[in-house]
Each structure stands twice: as C-alpha cells, then as structure tokens.
Amino acid sequence: MANLNYFPCTTTLSSSHPTFPKPPASHRLQITSENKNVDMETNSSNNISQPKVDRRNMLLGLGSGGLYSAANLVITPRDSSATPVQAPVLDRCGKAKDLNNGKDIDINCCPPDTDQIVEYRVPPVSQMKIRPSAHRVSDEYIFKYNMAIDRMKRLPKDDPRNFFQQANIHCAYCNGAYKLQEGQLDGPDPTEVLQVHNSWLFFPFHRWYLYFYERILGKMINDPTFALPFWNWDNPKGMTIPPMFLEKKSALYNEKRSKNDSMPPAVVDLGLTGEKNPLQLVTNNLTIMYNDMIRGNSDVYGFMGKEYRQGDAPDPGPGSVERSSHTSIHWWVGDPEKNGEDMGNFYTAGRDPLFYCHHANVDRMWTLWQYFIPSNKVPDKRITNFDFLNASFLFYDENKQLVRVRVRDCLDNLGMGYDFERIDLPWLDYRPPSQTAGARIRRANTISKLAATIFPLKLDQIVRVVVKKAKKGKADEELVLEDVEVDTSKFLKFDVFVNDEDDNSFELDKASYLGTYAQLPRKSETNKTVKTSINLKLTDLYDDMDIADDDRILVTLVPRNQGGGVTIGNIKIIEAPPAKKPAA
Ligand code: C2O
C-alpha cells in the first residue's frame, strides 16, 4: 500500500516540496558558444579523431553567417589507443530488417546522401530558449508548435528536415542501418552495427537530435526562439499524456498509441507494473525517479551508461534513466498490440511527435543530474574520457546542411542555447522509508538457491537467489548483473528487489526495490540477441534496510513482460565504485 506518511498530495506539492533550485553559479557562468569548459578536460581540443581522412571530410567554410569555421581543418593524428565512435558514412547506410516473427521486411531509414559535411560549431547564444513544461503551455504556443510540425510534415519527402526524415534518424541510428566504421573506407563493409542506445552515447546522441529538431521547427515558423516542450512525467502534475497531443485533428496527434491504458486521466506507470490506483502509481513513479536519479548510481557510468567505442559490441549497458523511466514511457505510450509502435519500438518511435516531448524531459534529467543533484549523493558527474568526448554523429541542420557534431560540444545545455522552465522536483527527497522490521533473509524456509548453482538463468518467472556480499560489514557495494543476454526484438523488463518480504509486485515504493532493466524492441539486421550488463548501487539500500552487517542478501528478480527473452549470466556483488575505472 502507498505509504501515506510520505505520499505528497498532488494539490499541495508546490508548497510541501523544495522548489526547483537555481543553477549553481558555475553553471550559469558557462553560457558560451564555444563550450570552453569542455576544453579543460582534454588536451586535444582540435583533435577530430578520424581513422582516415574521409573523402567527404571536407570542412567546408560554408555557412550561414559564419556559423561554421574552418578552424578544425587540421586533423591531428589520433592517439593510438583512442577509438571514439565515428559518425556513420552515409553512402554505407544499409537497410534495417525486421527479424521479428520471422518476417523479413526491409525498412529503409537512411537519410539523403551528400558529399558536403561541415564540422558544426554551436552558434553564439544571443537569447536563451526556455523549454516549457508541456502541461503548462499557452494556446498560442500550441498553435505555433502545431504549425511548425505541420509545415515539417509538408516538406518534400526528400528534404532531410521533413518530419518522416527526422523520424528516420532514430531508426537509422538504432536499427542497424549504420555500421561502426573501422577506418578503411575503401575496404569491405564493417559488420558491427552502430547503436546509440544502452551506452554512454544515449544522452549525447538524443541531445543533438533534439537540438536540430528544435532548430528546424523554429525555422519552419520563422521563430529562432522556439523551444520544444518537455513532458514533465517526473512530477505528479505532468503524469498524463499532455493534452495538446490528443487532439485528433492536430499535427501533434498520432494514431498508434495504446488506446485503453494510456489515455488521460490514466497516470503514467513508470514501473509498468499494471497498477491502476493513481495514488499508488504516483508513489511508485516518484520512488522510481528517486532511484534513477539518486539512489541507484555509484558513479557517472551508472547514470550515463557504460563505455562504448569503435569496434565494441553494441549495448554494453544502459544508464539508470535509460533502462527505467525512459523506456517505460516509450512502452506505456506505444500500442502493445503492434509490438509497441510507434513510441514503443525503436524504429518507429520518432514518428510520434510525443517522442520529442518525452525526450526533452529525458534531456532535462541529464541537466538536473549534472547541476542539481547534490554531489555528496553522486560524486563524479563528468566523463572526461577522450573516447566519450570525441564520439561524433551526423545530423542535418535547419538549413539542410549535413553537419558533424561531437559529444564534447553538447555537455552543457546553456552553452547550446537552451534551458528548461523551472518546475518542482518532488522526487528529490523521495527516499523510501526504512524497512528494518522483518527485512532479514528468511533463512530457514527460503526456497532460494545460492547464486553459483543456478546461472545462467532464464528469467521467465520470479526468481530468488542468495548472493554473498563482497565484504562483511559496512561497505559501498553494487549488485552487478552481468552477461545478461537479451532478445532485442522483444519488449523486456524486470525489477530487482533485495530481501523483499511480500513479493507484492505492484508496489515499488519501498526500500527493498533496487532497480529495473527495461528495453524496447527494435528491428535489426544483426544482433538479434545482445549481451549487456547493469550495476545497481546497494549502499543506500543497506542503510534503509539495516542489513549492512549481513554477509549475504536475498535478491528477487521479477520479470514484467510475457514470454522470457532474458537470460542472466551471473549476479555478484562488488565494492563500489567499481575497481575497474576506465582510463581517462
Ligand atoms: Cu532513442 Cu527514447 O530512445
């Protein structure tokens, strides 16, 4: 049952919860078009690490009012160990295939090809765009937004700014149309797919995607200050589909959404538990947000996702928001009868205008995490690794110019010229109440087994497993689920609990809830199954349940989707932050 002691009544939220704090001074000082703050983190600010000079890597000084410059023309040799993910080569874009249900339907989501690529420089910020909360916008705003999307839909089909071309960006980067370039452009096609999900590329890729999408919308209505709305699903006041997307005649409407379960007044179900009680849903949601943003991560990789470089297998491991609240919203909106389409399937997600509104909030979570979560909760918030900072993508800008962008230039939203409307963060103090009574492992009659005896484990029912702690007594520890083999053609989700007494799977608002893995289906040419892994921070849970001094814990895995699709290779507990720190 929802614990009423800490359930915030939605009508008093604004007075009983901390208001959205002001950005720290250092954040405000970083309003700069050059993103100089990034340069401090690496010695090689002009080093566009290219395996080989691409014939199209001509840094044209083309440009709209000198926005682009040839300053990066000198391509310095890359460090021999540096292998950032390279922007795809467009004329090698292939077809994505549907391997679902044995069908073999080709889907072509490649963008128009061109020979001219410009290195993108973020233009100077003259006026900050403020992205508004989608539930609070004016009729005038809705009118403009509609008009912009409508015009985008009416552009010629082969205009890269056309609505469907923009939707295809998501398909191409997520469904195996692009390959990881291996350096020899005249050599054979590389085989490893480029995947921007389930790794440290997740936030940066989607930030750039929305950045250009927003600029294109502004161009459509001649309003360079136009800012995308964000779907404020982390606040009870925003936990329904924003009304402007439901008007059937509107350009913001989309046919393919879950008809029964997600229409207002239905409250979003970030846990996808199937719970119907709105009060319980709100408490579940806030607990999940607290977990995704604060309680569940020991280090920056826990939030951002794991390292991913040129030549790596895709899907090394998603960060907390990606694998939890973010994925749940996709699936909750999409039509489960049609394998999640549009929102709930990677290759179609961008066809629903709601996608960009959803991702504006995902992007906001990155900003909040960077600048508003106290650093005693999450110590290091920056990835300074060369291969992260220099990973690159291609997008068409608002002037139909193909541009190459790098991760290093998107680390600060203010530097990119936009900010978010200030809204309360009711999850910020939503730590679940401690749960000491009865939280011990029921040693005598437990039906659980020792971890070593049951792996690899097919997760098609609730499983309980005893796991030994890394260290006896108080310690910062993480639960690691490794070699998790997932079927990428399916929607998958499971929740993880520790020393959970009642196994009531509708309630997540309790100390024993540790975290979630969820994934959207995708249509993909290769890699129908991938191996991934997740780390879940145990430290706070140990405190909340007063079990720091035990020498083992009982882990319960609760699958939420029908029909299996997940095999867990191993579960173990390690000291956190992980001993293996990536080389800076
Ligand atoms: Cu590219 Cu929300 O997914």
Image (tube, rainbow, N blue to C red):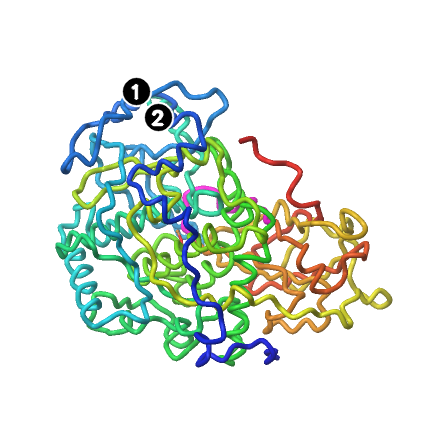
The answer to which quarter of the image holds residue 124 is: top left
- Image-based side of 125 in relation to 419, left or right: left
Compare residues 199 and 361 and report the one nearer the observer.
361
Residue 524 included in the magenta stretch of the image: yes
The answer to which quarter of the image holds residue 56 is: top left
Compare residues 551 and 561 and report the one nearer the observer.
551
Give the residue number, with chain letter if any, for mark 2.
46
Residues at badges 2 and 1 in contact (C-beta under 8 Å)? yes
Q: Secondary structure at mark 1?
A: loop
Residue depicted at 67% across the width and 45% down the height = 576
The stretch of residues the image draws in magenta is 522-534
- Residue 327 against residue 453 in the figure, above or below: below
Whole-percent x and y of residue 133?
Answer: 33, 66
Whole-percent x and y of residue 274?
Answer: 52, 73
Whole-percent x and y of residue 149?
Answer: 20, 60
Q: Is residue 529 visible?
A: yes
- Residue 77 against residue 136 in the figure, above or below: above
Task: Report the residue that reaches farthest toward the front.
Answer: 25
- Image-based side of 419 in relation to 78, left or right: left
Query: Is the residue marked 1 within 8 Å of ligand 1, measured from its CB?
Result: no
Residue depicted at 75% across the width and 60% down the height = 554
Q: Secondary structure at mark 2?
A: loop
Compare residues 280 and 414 and report the one nearer the observer.
414
Residue 462 included in the magenta stretch of the image: no
Residue 74 is tagged as 1
**Could you tell me the amino acid type at mark 1?**
Val
Residue depicted at 77% across the width and 51% down the height = 469
